Image (cartoon, grey):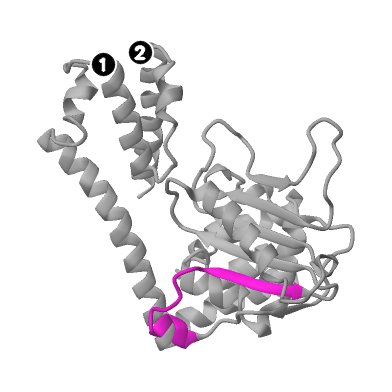
């Protein structure tokens, strides 16, 4: 029987990578993402996993903070939905972590590098093809980078399509992402065989224990229900609006092209479809500069992606 525990579930994610006993897994994931010249060899967790935080429903931001042997700070966050302002939030949060380390009376030279990482279960930039984006403070003309300050990394799981047959030749980062997305589909023995690396095996053993321990499984199921309920609400809102013709000036009418102001109607439809996909909206001003044919091509592509997602269940 498959393990059935999704590692990207907030409860499972925090327990896998935020537990002091699992530092090896977190170190491996960080090194796979960052590919630093001097790899991380040890970490101190600043906000370790605590079951009580989940029990009291106080853990609203699913980040993991850690400091390595050199003083560098790592913040790793799992985002299960995409919303307007997400990019700005990622930047704000990274800057907040960087500035937050300076205490009264300390010199700016005492600031340590900060690596802010956001793992996203979706797609942030529809016009890109990259899974991993690494943003650094770099001068576009001279290519000079302010090294040792702030880096922001995003990984868009919605773009990842590696198959199990390709795992043997995959990079460590690719293997980690595959594990995060598909571990729940495998029986434990098969998963341990596919991933012989000690760090991923440790992570696998953690989700196996979640499946076996009653209180952990209960909490996991509760968080899964919350995730499903939120997605259901978005989807139901869209479906009901189509049926009743009441979403954003009658979505059904827009789809059939029967209302006045087709350009405005297409733009509203695009934004509605992006909401269903949990993606940030295209700027209205940018869309207004496009032809009706171009806008309709965008809605066709968004519809296809919704259909693919619905088919996957």
Would you say 31 lies left or right of 120 here?
A: right
- Which residue occupies the extreme left position in the image? 244
Q: Which of 74 and 304 is in front in this view?
A: 74
Span shown in magenta: 51-67
Residue drawn at (45%, 69%) of the image: 4
| On screen, residue 100 above or below 133 | below
Q: Which of 308 and 272 is in front in this view?
A: 272
Q: Can residue 3 be seen in this view?
A: no
The magenta stretch spans residue 22: no
Residue 228: horizontal and vertical position, in percent?
32, 60
Residue 262: image tag? 1
Q: What element carries label 1?
A: helix
Q: Is residue 181 visible?
A: yes
| Pointer 1 local density, CA inside 10 Å: few below 14, some 14–19, many at least 20 | some
| On screen, residue 96 above or below 22 | above
Q: How far apart are marks 1 and 2 (CA)?
A: 7 Å
Residue drawn at (78%, 33%) of the image: 140
């Amino acid at each position: 029987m498959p393990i059935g525990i999704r590692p990207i579930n907030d409860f499972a994610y925090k327990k896998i990578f935020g537990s002091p006993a699992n530092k090896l897994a977190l170190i491996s994931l960080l090194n796979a993402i960052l590919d630093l010249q001097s790899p991380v060899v040890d970490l101190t967790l600043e906000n370790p996993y605590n079951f009580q935080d989940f029990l009291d429903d106080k853990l609203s931001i699913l980040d993991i903070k850690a400091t390595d042997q050199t003083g560098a700070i790592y913040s790793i966050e799992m985002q299960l939905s995409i919303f307007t302002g997400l990019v700005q939030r990622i930047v704000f949060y990274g800057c907040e972590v960087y500035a937050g380390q300076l205490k009264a009376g300390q010199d700016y030279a005492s600031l340590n590098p900060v690596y802010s990482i956001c793992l996203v279960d979706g797609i942030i930039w529809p016009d890109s093809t990259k899974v991993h984006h690494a943003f650094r403070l770099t001068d576009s003309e001279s290519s000079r980078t302010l090294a040792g300050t702030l880096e922001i990394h995003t990984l868009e799981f919605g773009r990842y399509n590696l198959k199990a047959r390709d795992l043997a030749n995959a990079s460590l980062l690719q293997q980690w992402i595959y594990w995060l997305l598909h571990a729940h589909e495998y029986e434990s023995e098969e998963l341990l065989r596919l991933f012989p690396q000690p760090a991923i095996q440790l992570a696998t053993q953690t989700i196996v224990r979640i499946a076996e321990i009653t209180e952990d499984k209960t909490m996991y199921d509760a968080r899964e229900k919350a995730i499903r309920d939120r997605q259901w609400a978005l989807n139901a809102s869209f479906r009901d609006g189509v049926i009743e013709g009441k979403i954003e000036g009658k979505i059904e009418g827009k789809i059939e092209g029967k209302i006045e102001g087709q350009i405005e109607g297409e733009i509203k439809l695009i934004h509605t479809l992006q909401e269903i996909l949990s993606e940030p909206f295209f700027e209205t001003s940018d869309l207004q500069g496009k032809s009706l044919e171009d806008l309709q091509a965008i809605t066709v592509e968004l519809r296809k992606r919704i259909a693919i997602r619905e088919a996957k269940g």
